[in-house]
Image: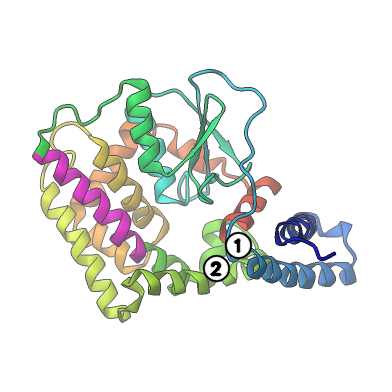
Amino acid sequence: MSESPGHVQGSLAALYESLQTSVLQLFTDPTQLSPGQAVLVAASALFVGAVVWTCCGGQRWTKVKLRAEFTPGMVYLHTLPAVKAIPCLTPFGIKLETYLRMADIPYEPMYGRSIGPKGKVPWIEYNGEAMGDSGLIMEFLNREKGVDLNRSLSDADKAVGRAFTKMVEENTYWGMAWNRWIDNFDNLHDLFEVSKTVMFFLRPFKGRLQQTMWAHGIGRHSKVDLEGIIEKDLRAISTFLGTKPYLMGDEPTEVDAAVFGQLSELLWTLPGSYLHRIVTVDCPNLQAYCSRIKDRYWPDWDQLTKNAKKTKEDMSLYSEIFSM
């Protein structure tokens, strides 16, 4: 009797997890593996990873790992660990954590456990349930906690805030992604604070990003056209911000969490790029804006980045996310 597709996928997944553990040992404690074992493990992991991807149709088979015990009403935030440049390498993680701080919602950060129910980070656990997507999480917590950072805004202002949020997350974001993963892939080991060996295993993500951006449509532009599009986005934010402390006025609203999430990655993780030049030289009010939010809501920023240190769990999470 032939095995069912689900059984085959489960077996391959288990094999891949076993090999991934060995590969992780290769990165973090190579003295436990002989040279022959190291080569065999690396080659096997690549082969099985390709087979799993093909058999599973590119879909995630990893189930969300929930806490056995939890404090009712506590938000457990699953996100990427800090590096020396920034507390989180995904703008959506910065966005969600900034929102939690703005709304004064108690939370506990969780690093290196697993990716979320939608195959991404950040995600949260709340009262024994898992939830993904930073925007939907914010909407849920607004209802659950009675929070409304937009309470002072008119309906028209809320519409403007949503438009800017969607612009930076569905358009501007891809400029950062391209600059980080395509233009500067060979330097990413410095940003991620991992060895070049680890980056070798993340190289397939570079090709998948290009495919994703092509399907999105923004990846069909020339590099010159793409950079021009993103520059117009950033200048639009700068023009609208003007001399105001926050986008919508004197106090921050939800859109500031989203925009800060994106701009912070440009400002603190892409030195020397055209994006960094725009937010510091061409549009200095964007740099001042980011510093203002950082100083107000991230008093522990320097402590988090100074103490950044990768663990085996962190490496596993990176591998899981970027092998999707």
Figure quadrant of residue 104: top left
Percent across and percent down for residue 319 are 63, 57
Which residue type carries mark 1?
A: Ser
Mark 2, secondary structure of its residue: helix
184 over 122 or under it: above or below? below
Q: Which mark is residue 226?
A: none
Question: For the residues marked 1 and 2, what is the alpha-carbon distance in whole angstroms?
Answer: 6 Å
Q: Residue at x 68, y 71 (%)?
A: 50
Image quadrant occupied by the N terminus:
bottom right
Which residue type carries mark 2?
A: Phe
Figure quadrant of residue 147: top left
Res 196 visible: no
Q: Which mark is residue 323?
A: 1
Mark 1, secondary structure of its residue: loop
Give the residues drawn in magenta, as a range: 156-175
Res 166 visible: yes
Horizontally, residue 197 falls left or right of residue 127, namely right
Q: Residue at x 48, y 19 (%)?
A: 73
Look at the numbered discs 1 and 2 and tell me whether their residues touch, using CB distance below 8 Å. Answer: yes
Horizontally, residue 315 falls left or right of residue 298, namely right
Percent across and percent down for residue 308 are 57, 44
Query: Overall secondary structure of the magenta stretch?
Result: helix
Q: Which residue is mark 2?
A: 205
